[in-house]
Amino acid sequence: MDYSDFRESERQGWSDRAHVYEHATAKATTQSIPALLAAVYPFHGARLLDVGCGPGYVAGAATALSATAKGLDFSAEMVEAAKLRFPEIPFEVGDAENLTDANCTYDAVASNIVLFHITNPMKAIKEAFRVLKPNGYFAFSQWCAPSESALYADFFGILSKHADMSKAEAAPDAFTLSDRAKVADMFEEAGFEEFITVDVPNILRAPAANFYDFFMQFGVRIPLILSKQEAAVQKRIRHEVNTHFERYRVQNEIHVPMPSMVYSGKRPI
Ligand SMILES: C[S@@+](CC[C@H](N)C(=O)[O-])C[C@H]1O[C@@H](n2cnc3c(N)ncnc32)[C@H](O)[C@@H]1O
């Protein structure tokens, strides 16, 4: 299957959101960072690669723990946002599926909520393995599937009532990587040992006024599906989303559970 249109839409989608990321997506993704970093043991001076760094939060947190971090992202706008936020850390444009670093460069590779945006996650896992030193750790985080996530269960419930999903661009299944057993197999295939999964109870926090508009800035994959729907369908979904998610209101915010998991493994000697 050719996912090149999807890949380009992803890159454009994240580039368009780089300037609002801290007020939208980061409010949920940053909640996975403590578990992600705990899984890769960033010791003092450890060389750590933040893959799909966005505005650089993982590299920033690793640097605060006295690791020596570098970040890469395939969106030039995200890389610029990361450089502005953490001017002391090197960030570069790069592709998770084709890292430019030499074999055995890093003590740790971490990727926060990135691999399900990638056309070939197995390739990215193998690349992480390749650039790790023996005894180095790789971890990535992933949103839980609708069966475990109030946000995705409710959102896809509304979409399935109104949207014509056949109009969506060809894309890899967003929740394949939410299957713990499948990801365990992928880690094993890449050569990792000591596979561990840790669950993280993320809460998506949004301003209560117009949850739909917030969500269109929050992610890329669902807005891509919605952009292919007719205007009247989009209007119906917008209305139902705004009404439905009121049940999660806390004061002037919406707080919806959207748990994630952190997977990790070690490159053997
Ligand atoms: C949900 S954001 C996560 C950003 C950041 N890791 C965080 O902690 O918030 C996904 C990021 O992955 C990047 N990305 C997607 N596919 C990529 C690829 N093939 N190579 C590098 N970066 C990629 C996007 O540009 C975007 O910045």
Image: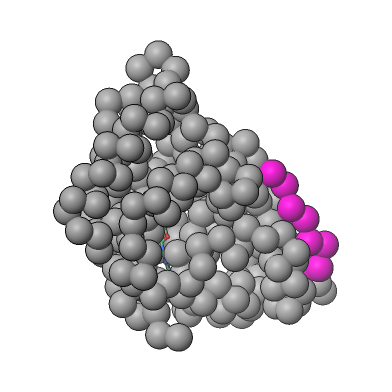
Give left or right: position of 68 versus 137. Answer: left
Give left or right: position of 113 versus 18. Answer: right
* Quadrant the C terminus occupies: bottom right
- Quadrant of picture, ligand 1: bottom left
Give left or right: position of 263 versus 19. Answer: right
* Quadrant the N terminus occupies: bottom left
Q: Please state the horizontal and vertical placement of residue 155, each as a whole percent of the image.
A: 43, 45
Q: Please state the horizontal and vertical placement of residue 230, each as a whole percent of the image.
A: 20, 58
Give left or right: position of 170 versus 210. Answer: right
> In this view of the protein, which residue sits in the foreground, 84 or 239?
239
Residue at 75% across, 72% down: 185
Residue at 69% across, 73% down: 186
Residue 26, picture quadrant: top left
Residue at 69% across, 66% down: 183
Q: Which residues are magenta?
A: 192-199
Q: Please state the horizontal and vertical placement of residue 94, each as a whole percent of the image.
A: 40, 71
> Can residue 192 be seen here?
yes
The dominant secondary structure in magenta is strand
Tell which residue pokes out farthest to the bottom in this image: 1
Residue at 50% across, 62% down: 174
Tell which residue pokes out farthest to the front in this image: 161
Decide whether residue 194 is among the magenta residues: yes
120 vs 50: above or below = below
> Can residue 93 be seen here?
no
Decide whether residue 248 is among the magenta residues: no
Residue 179, picture quadrant: bottom right
> In this view of the protein, which residue sits in the foreground, 109 or 32?
32
22 vs 265: above or below = above
> In this view of the protein, which residue sits in the foreground, 229 or 212?
229
Q: Please state the horizontal and vertical placement of residue 175, each as a whole percent of the image.
A: 56, 60
Tell which residue pokes out farthest to the left in this image: 231
225 vs 156: above or below = below
